[in-house]
Image: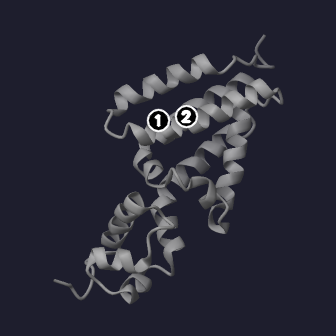
Amino acid sequence: MRRAEPETRGEILTAAARRFAATGYRGTSLQDIATEVGCSKATVLYHFANKEALLTELMAPAIAVLQALDARLTGLTGGAAQRAAAEGFVDLAVRFRREIALLRSEFPELLRQPAFAHVQRISERLLDALAGNSDRPAARIAALVLLAGISEGCAEFVDVPDEELRPALLALTRRALEPVPDPNHD
């Protein structure tokens, strides 16, 4: 039985998250979301300008934490940047692993959308920090593999408690990244 109106924007967001998880962002239409909520597509469009606006709102809390991490990394170099980036990204990935799981197969494509262009730039700075601001291929490869692996691991192990997942990921980062000397600490 169809209802005339969803009770809240949150109900539409919850339905969108479920649909994105089940069929992907590209595979989900606004009509699919409306049907799941039990309202019209026009009602969804009343609350959200388009599907990208829905996704933007779903991802806003994670993006805000990513932006805060980016701000913390500003001015850090070497090992200090590397440690802060590793800890900050692990914390972000553990906290928002359900959002990562929602979009993991489509993440590279989504980053190319205008609404997420700033996320791509922050991701590049995060990669630089994880590599200890090194141009050495080995350091950059390790950083890239860690970013992808942490994201994938968090998306895959959504049911592992935070207090188990976080230390495991931090231990992995310590083993995978070559320590970079801090220029201010000899």
State the residue lying farthest toward the left.
1
Query: Up-down: is 28 above or below 150?
Result: below
* x and y percentages locating residue 29 in the rendered image: 44, 75
Q: Residue at x 49, y 27 (%)?
A: 169
Q: How is the image coloured?
A: one colour
Residue 60 in sight here: yes
- In the image, 52 versus 181, the foreground residue is 52
C-alpha distance separating marks 2 and 1: 6 Å
Local packing at callout 1 (Cα closer than 10 Å; few below 14, some 14-19, many 20+) is some
* x and y percentages locating residue 131 in the rendered image: 72, 29
Q: Are marks 2 and 1 in contact (CB under 8 Å)?
A: yes
Residue 81 in sight here: no
The residue pinned by badge 2 equals 149
User: Which image quadrant for residue 47?
Assistant: bottom left
Residue 97 marker? none
Badge 2 marks a residue whose secondary structure is helix
Image quarter of the N terminus: bottom left
Q: Residue at x 34, y 79 (%)?
A: 34
Q: Residue at x 72, y 52 (%)?
A: 121
Query: Up-down: is 14 above or below 161?
Result: below
The residue pinned by badge 1 equals 153
Amino acid on which disc 2 is placed:
Gly
Q: Residue at x 37, y 65 (%)?
A: 19
* x and y percentages locating residue 38 in the rendered image: 25, 80
- In the image, 153 versus 125, the foreground residue is 153
